[in-house]
Image: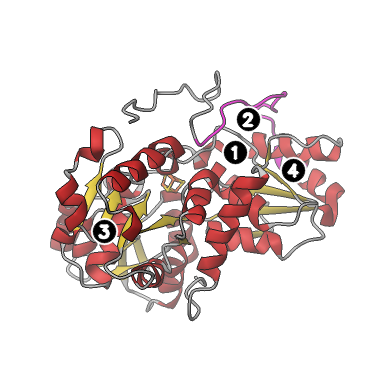
């Protein structure tokens, strides 16, 4: 049983092969103060032409997003890259697990580059393969593994997606979690779901969308022996939620929602399902980043919104919709710190290296992991309806 917590890792130093993210960034980065950075990025992109395709996740900084050929959430971006086979180089301005997914879904001749290897995801780091294998052993010992279908959120490492593929499970996004859970529960009589790694998305979907009760859910704590659960609890549960969360969306709190409503009775609260259950319960609308963007685009002029998702996206939405009042659902600044590791100096360095014929920070998933992760992703693509669309 793994009971060792992840050590705090000073970003950019040393190596820790157990973490989802890498830690090194070799080479000479341009100075952040270099006034020519924008011109250099533009020139490098022009020199590479169709050979490069730059993906920009919605949570990226503006200085990076301006160079993205396409923006979106992680799954949309990976599919966009796969639809551009002429692009030899996919520069993924996002985090490590996203670049892995792009590598899994793109062709062999396409090389995926992450401009800063320290851009990991704290949520993905909360479920490591050894921990999940330990949990599966415990489920086996409790006599329930045969009825468990693992479901992992897109925001997980390729290792975890591979584990899920090997154990007849499926990947989901925040847009299709309900459909994926419906599929999982239909796989076996008396099926249970092991939901990785975001407990909040799992709980919010099971309870608010599918009619399960909170008592149907238990939380597996990978840092405690037996997950901190008895065998009876495992036998009784329908949803076994991995104790992971997003460090950005987990910050929003119910008291701020109450405070905003008291100040402005017209405000509509729009949040991502990675937020905690008490926040989601108080929200008017809940959905993925794509849903949040579309909701604001379709909103009436003059409407008031408080949005619970990453701050770069909220700021861009506010700037793009000056006819609507858009505020951030937290008292404090709340960027995704690892996503923000991708900055203009790193992007320039990655692009200029490609121009010079050097592929830096390539993200490559090993063939066996890729095979099983692709199976888990394909099961998601095969889910009924348009559930995998945003
Ligand atoms: S916003 Fe949350 S889930 Fe997304 S990359 Fe950052 S830590 Fe991970």
Q: Are marks 1 and 3 in contact (CB under 8 Å)?
A: no
Dot 4: few (<14), some (14–19), or many (≥20) neighbours within 10 Å?
many
Looking at the rendered image, the quarter that the N terminus falls into is: top left
Q: Give how far apart the Cα atoms at labels 2 and 4 are.
A: 13 Å
For the point 81% across and 45% down, the residue is 43
Dot 1: few (<14), some (14–19), or many (≥20) neighbours within 10 Å?
some
**For numbered disc 2, what is the local secondary structure?**
loop
Q: How many marks?
A: 4
Res. 36 mark:
none
**For numbered disc 4, what is the local secondary structure?**
helix
Return the residue at label 3: 239
Compare marks 2 and 3 and give the one earlier in the sequence: 2
Return the residue at label 4: 41
Compare marks 4 and 1 and give the one earlier in the sequence: 4
Give coordinates of residue 176: x percent, y percent: 43, 69
Compare marks 3 and 4 and give the one earlier in the sequence: 4
Dot 2: few (<14), some (14–19), or many (≥20) neighbours within 10 Å?
few
Return the residue at label 1: 343
User: Looking at the image, which is closer to me, 183 or 34?
Assistant: 183
Res. 32 mark:
2
Q: Give how far apart the Cα atoms at labels 2 and 3 are.
A: 46 Å
Q: Residue furthest top?
A: 14
Compare marks 2 and 4 and give the one earlier in the sequence: 2
Q: Are marks 2 and 1 in contact (CB under 8 Å)?
A: yes
């Amino acid at each position: 049983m793994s009971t060792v917590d992840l050590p705090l890792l000073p970003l950019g130093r040393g190596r820790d092969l157990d973490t989802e993210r890498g830690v090194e960034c070799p080479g000479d980065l341009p100075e952040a103060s270099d006034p020519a950075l924008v011109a250099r990025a533009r020139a490098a992109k022009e020199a590479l032409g169709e050979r490069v395709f730059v993906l920009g996740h919605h949570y990226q900084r503006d200085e990076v997003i301006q160079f993205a050929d396409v923006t979106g959430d992680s799954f949309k971006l990976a599919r966009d890259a796969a639809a551009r086979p002429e692009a030899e180089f996919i520069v993924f301005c996002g985090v490590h697990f996203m670049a892995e997914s792009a590598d899994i879904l793109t062709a062999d001749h396409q090389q995926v580059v992450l401009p800063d290897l320290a851009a990991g995801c704290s949520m993905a780091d909360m479920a490591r393969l050894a921990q999940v294998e330990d949990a599966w052993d415990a489920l086996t010992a409790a006599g329930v593994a045969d009825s468990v279908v693992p479901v992992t959120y897109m925001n997980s490492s390729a290792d975890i997606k591979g584990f899920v593929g090997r154990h007849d499970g499926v990947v989901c996004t925040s847009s299709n979690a309900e459909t994926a859970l419906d599929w999982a529960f239909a796989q076996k009589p008396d099926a249970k779901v092991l939901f990785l790694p975001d407990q909040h998305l799992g709980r919010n979907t099971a309870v608010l969308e599918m009619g399960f009760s909170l008592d149907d859910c238990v939380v597996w704590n990978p840092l405690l022996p037996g997950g901190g659960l008895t065998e009876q609890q495992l036998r009784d549960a329908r949803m076994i939620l991995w104790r992971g969360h997003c460090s950005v969306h987990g910050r929003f709190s119910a008291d701020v929602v109450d405070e905003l409503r008291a100040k402005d009775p017209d405000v509509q609260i729009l949040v991502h399902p990675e937020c905690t259950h008490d926040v989601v319960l108080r929200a008017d609308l809940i959905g993925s980043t794509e849903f949040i963007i579309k909701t604001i685009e379709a909103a009436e002029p003059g409407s008031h919104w408080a949005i619970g998702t990453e701050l770069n996206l909220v700021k861009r939405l506010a700037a793009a919709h000056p006819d609507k009042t858009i505020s951030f659902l937290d008292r404090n600044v709340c960027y995704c710190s690892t996503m923000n590791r991708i900055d203009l100096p790193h992007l320039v360095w990655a692009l200029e290296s490609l121009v010079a014929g050097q592929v830096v920070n390539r993200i490559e998933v090993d063939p066996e992991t890729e095979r099983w992760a692709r199976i888990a992703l394909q099961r998601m693509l095969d889910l009924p309806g348009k559930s995998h669309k945003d």
